[in-house]
Image: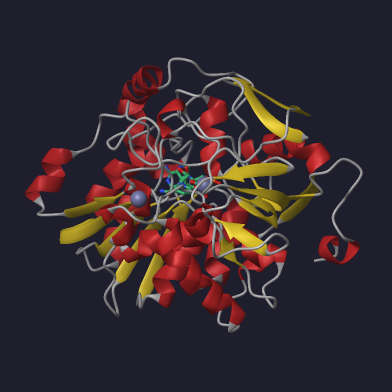
Amino acid sequence: MRAVVFHRVGDIRLENVPEPKIQEPTDAIVRLIASAICGTDLHMVRGTLPGMEPGTILGHEGVGIIEDVGKEVRNLKVGERVVIPSTIACGYCSYCRAGYYAQCDNANPNGKNAGTAFYGGPRMSGPFNGLQAEYARIPFANIGLVKVPESVTNDQAITISDIFPTGYFGADIADIEPGDVVVVFGCGPVGLFTILSAQLQGAGRVIAVDHIPDRLDRARELGAETIDFNREDPVDVILELTGGIGADCVIDVVGVDAEMPKSGPAAEKLKEQKEEYIKEVQQIAPERSDKWVAGDAPSLVLSWAVQVVEKAGTLSIIGVYPQTVRNFPIGLSMNKNLSIRSGNCNHRKYIPTLLDLVESGVVDPSKFLTNKEAFGSVIDAYKAFDERRPGWIKVELTGMKEGEEAAPEELAA
Ligand SMILES: NC(=O)c1ccc[n+]([C@@H]2O[C@H](COP(=O)([O-])OP(=O)(O)OC[C@H]3O[C@@H](n4cnc5c(N)ncnc54)[C@H](O)[C@@H]3O)[C@@H](O)[C@H]2O)c1
Ligand SMILES: [Zn+2]
Ligand SMILES: [Zn+2]
């Protein structure tokens, strides 16, 4: 079957690999009909999320049809259409039962304390083969697959695999109260879903920061007040917009590939720190590839976030940082009595709620997809997304099987 295979940092290829088989009675095999490329995949290809095992199939977003089920999968049938939560969880340990699916005690073969198990990730996350493939093996399928209601389209469902639940989670752990001022750093696909989710959860105002014009336009269309960090200093502007108080909640949806402002007053202010940030990149990601565009200021958003949150406010961190990142402004944070909440999304906790919101017409998440690419051009799509080319915000992949492109009505969307 065809799959996107990680060879080494900077080198990923679409190639033929053996099809997965049921290994445990709790497994299922799914034939993918839609997948996608996430900002997290970019960290791995760029080298800023280190520890990838060569040969791992990438991708952790998927919608598909069940092809086979193990004998302990009692709630699903071959032929059903399902969405795949990105993180893998057993569904029966105390963490799963409390909704902390991303901290499951049983899913990660590296042990209870190894962290989140997910598809297509580094060694410490399993490793599990991912979902940018024709077929995938799904462990703990009874909990690791969720049936998609008939009226929910594949385009809608693919956003519910990872990016919508993650945005919803980011807003949830920010403890938003009705009327709160919420700042969202990063207007990539997950950032845009975070803005929407903050609004769904009662935010009075959302202020969004990025530097890519079409992403800021999207944020503004959603109703966020936008700040381009290459034109204005986000710290000064947010304090100005909030009467000097700062925001109630700040959500980091950028992660390790944060970029330095290249112009404007923020660039001027940070001139002296440029070298420090370069050293930080070298320490976090010693192995990088010139062909892919990594960020150049890994902890910058954390520093901005702590400056713009009000005293005793809440910081929610859902941008991904590898364990090699050590620079968090703990002194300023501690002295402001901040609450800090963070982590990988507990996808499975939110998916049923989000399917309901879509089925009932409250939200149409397919409008967040900007590109639908045939699987044959997946590597080009990775490049376009990596370079943040105008218009390339969220790429859906279809037509996994060679010669079997997406259905015409799907491509028309
Ligand atoms: N916690 C989770 O479970 C989870 C799940 C999915 C994705 N993620 C993470 O969420 C983050 C966003 O994902 P995405 O797919 O939207 O990625 P993305 O790369 O498309 O988006 C990142 C955005 O941040 C912007 N940015 C860069 N530097 C900035 C700065 N200094 N200030 C403000 N904005 C800045 C970029 O211009 C870009 O638009 C990534 O770190 C990804 O790994 C986390
Ligand atoms: Zn992701
Ligand atoms: Zn568990």
Task: Choose top left, top right, bottom left or bottom right for residue 159.
Answer: bottom right
Snapshot quadrant of residue 105: top left
| Quarter residue 329 falls in | top left
Where does the image place residue 276, in percent across and percent down from the top left? 31, 22
Q: Percent position (x, y) of residue 336?
A: 11, 52
| Residue 30, image x, y percentages | 67, 50
- In this rendering, position of residue 14 left or right of residue 84: right
Residue occupying the far front of the picture: 71
Residue 224 in view: no
Q: Nearer the viewer, residue 105 or 292?
A: 105
Name the residue at 43% across, 76% down.
200
- Left or right relative to 13: residue 71: left
| Side of 288 relative to 314 (left or right) | right
Please tell me whether residue 314 is drawn above or below residue 14 in the rendered image. Answer: below
Residue at the image position 35 percent from the left and 77 percent from the top: 204
Quarter of the image with the N terminus in it: top right
| Above or below, 70 relative to 320 | below
Q: Position of residue 365 (x, y in %)?
A: 61, 68
Q: In the rendered view of the protein, which quadrant contains the C terminus? A: bottom right
Residue 375 visible to an observer of this rendering: yes
- In this picture the colour scheme is secondary structure
- Mark count: 0
On the rendered structure, is 133 left or right of 376? left
Which residue is depicted at the point 28% across and 61% down?
Answer: 98
The residue drawn where x is 60% and y is 83% is 361
Viewer-nearest residue: 302 or 54: 54
